[in-house]
Image (tube, rainbow, N blue to C red):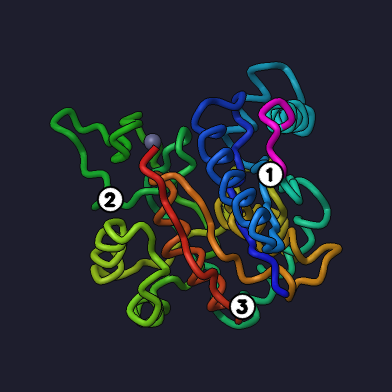
Amino acid sequence: MKKYYITTPLYYVNAAPHIGHAYTTVAADVLARFLRSTGRPVHLLTGTDEHGSKIEAAARESGLAPEEFAGRISESFRELWRHLDIRYDDFIRTTEPRHESRVQECFSRLLAAGDIYKGRYRGFYCVSDETYWTETDAPPDPKGRRLCPNPECRKPLQEVEEESYFFRLSKYQRPLLDHYRDHPDFLRPPHRANEILRFVEGGLQDTAVSRTKVKWGIPVPADPEHTVYVWFDALLNYVTAPQSGADFADIWPADVHIVGKEIYRFHAVTWPAMLMALGLPLPRAVFAHGW
Ligand SMILES: [Zn+2]
């Protein structure tokens, strides 16, 4: 019998765990415990997301190498889960070889298939959110500054222009809309579906999946000047983790990815498009809580 596969997001190790991480993980644990009590086999995955410029910067500030810094924070997450008696079946770190080698494999496959291509990126980057914004997303304010459009952030953006690999997200607009229509339980809870539908109907732009300025990341195979953009790397954990050990088909596809609302778009749009490009079945549901 296929296991009921539940995931939490991979927590970013730029700072110590906080109540938001505990909230999501306790919710996932409650669901897992409930299902186990009904006799259903369950696989609960959690872990830590450890690459990117924010971690590079946080490590520098604390005088540690990024590996060591990430290792310490990752361990503090495990400690918290022990303390809260969270029963997970697997804990993945994105710095583990089992993850890194498969991310490189996926990157190469998508490059060979033409779903990843090399181009030039010009835009505005928020270090705090690890997010790129376009000119339209972040128009200059009356003082001529460009500020992060994320209302929780609003920090000044850096203008960047660089050679970059892109994921052909635009190609998946129609397939995504078809999928949402044919699987009404995919976007959950239902009131969150509207914002995703409106966003995808508005058209999708290809998205940068590599950076040359960030050294703390997974090198792009055959082009190690580039590292894989941290979001692309982290999302893949949901498939790289079950590929080790247990039989992949007993676990994948995920029954539910539980996430907070601030990362819903990545999970409801980018992630299913990546899976379509890789030829893998899509998760049954992506559930965002509103904190
Ligand atoms: Zn920001």
Q: Is residue 62 above or below residue 145?
A: above
The residue beneath circle 3 is 280
Residue 188 x %, y %: 38, 60
- Name the quadrant of the C terminus: top left
Left or right, 229 with respect to 189, comes to right
Tell me which label, 1 or 2, sits earlier in the chain: 1
Numbered tag placed on residue 135 in the rendering: 2
Q: Is residue 45 above or below residue 73?
A: below
Residue 95 x %, y %: 76, 46
The residue beneath circle 1 is 47
Mark 3 burial class by Cα count in 10 Å: few <14, some 14-19, many 20+: few
Mark 1 burial class by Cα count in 10 Å: few <14, some 14-19, many 20+: many
**Could you say whether the residue bearing mark 3 is in a helix, strand or loop?**
loop
Residue type indicated by callout 1: Gly
Q: Is residue 283 above or below residue 237?
A: below
Q: Is residue 79 above or below residue 199?
A: above
The foreground one among 130 and 252 is 252
Q: Do the CB atoms of the residues marked 1 and 3 lie less than 8 Å apart?
A: no
Q: Do the CB atoms of the residues marked 1 and 2 lie less than 8 Å apart?
A: no
What residue appears at the point 27 percent right and 50 percent down from the top-left corner? 135
Tell me which label, 3 or 2, sits earlier in the chain: 2
Left or right, 97 with respect to 45, comes to right
In the image, which residues are magenta?
82-87
Residue 271 x %, y %: 51, 64
Q: CA distance from mark 1 to mark 2?
A: 34 Å
Left or right, 251 with respect to 172, comes to right
Determine if residue 243 is in view.
Answer: yes
